[in-house]
Amino acid sequence: MLNIKALTELLSHNRDDRLCKTWYVMTINGTLLAHSQPVRINDLRRQAAMAALSWQRYDNSAHAADQISDEFDRDSQAEEGMVGTPLRALTIESETSNVIIRKIQPSLLLVLEGGIPPGRVRPTSRFTLESEDGTERSVDANGEDLERADASKVSSSVLQRQRSKLDALSAVIVRDFEHSGFRMPDDPGLIIF
């Protein structure tokens, strides 16, 4: 059984106001299970919905490929070599924040919304997809491939620190879930978008 109170305490203990602003655990359809506190719940629900939509858009595992709605073009995804490649992590670099999403179980995601360095302006959003085999691909909001950006050392360092914190916390959570025997049910009806 999932101990929501303990998970909320763990997430809250690992947040701060600059680098790791908000943590949450959610299902792949955006259902919040636990989150760091304090938080504005309406903003968090909106963020979780956006994270779920982004994850579903780019997660092209065999299971997700079967669930893709008609608005996504399977043929173009097949041409890009994306179908059949499950995501391990998705990083969204926007104008105001970095959002890093990591799969901790097949139907469960750990999300970190982190701050960006002051004065850092990004003209467009950047999505970095990391597959289970460790390969990475960066795309813009339209899904067009991007070359490796010449990001400043400060912003790269911030993103690397956020990613290392996310990886460390996900390892702790996964280990705890394995120890307690918790497993989120794999329900194909979870994808609702």
Image (cartoon, rainbow, N blue to C red):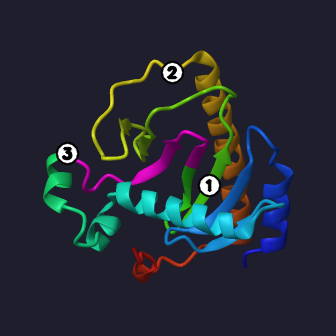
Q: Nearer the viewer, mark 3 or mark 2?
A: 2
> Secondary structure under badge 1?
strand
Where, by quadrant of the figure, is residue 73 drawn?
bottom left
Q: Position of residue 99 (x, y in %)?
A: 58, 47
State the residue position of label 1. 111
How many labels sit on residues?
3
Is the C-beta separation of discs 2 and 1 under 8 Å? no
Q: Which of marks 3 and 2 is nearer the N terminus?
A: 3
Q: Where is residue 93 in the image (x, y as percent from the top left)?
A: 52, 39
Magenta stretch in the rendered image: 81-100
User: Residue visible at 67% across and 43% down?
Assistant: 114
In this view, 117 is above or below 56: above
Residue 84 counted in the magenta span:
yes
> Secondary structure under badge 3?
loop
User: Residue visible at 58% across and 24% down?
Assistant: 156
| Circle number at residue 168 | none
Quarter the C terminus occupies: bottom left
Identify residue type, mark 3. Answer: Glu
| Circle number at residue 80 | 3
> Of residues 174 and 28, which is closer to you in this image?
28
Where, by quadrant of the figure, is residue 66 drawn?
bottom left
User: Residue visible at 30% across and 46% down?
Assistant: 143
State the residue position of label 2. 151
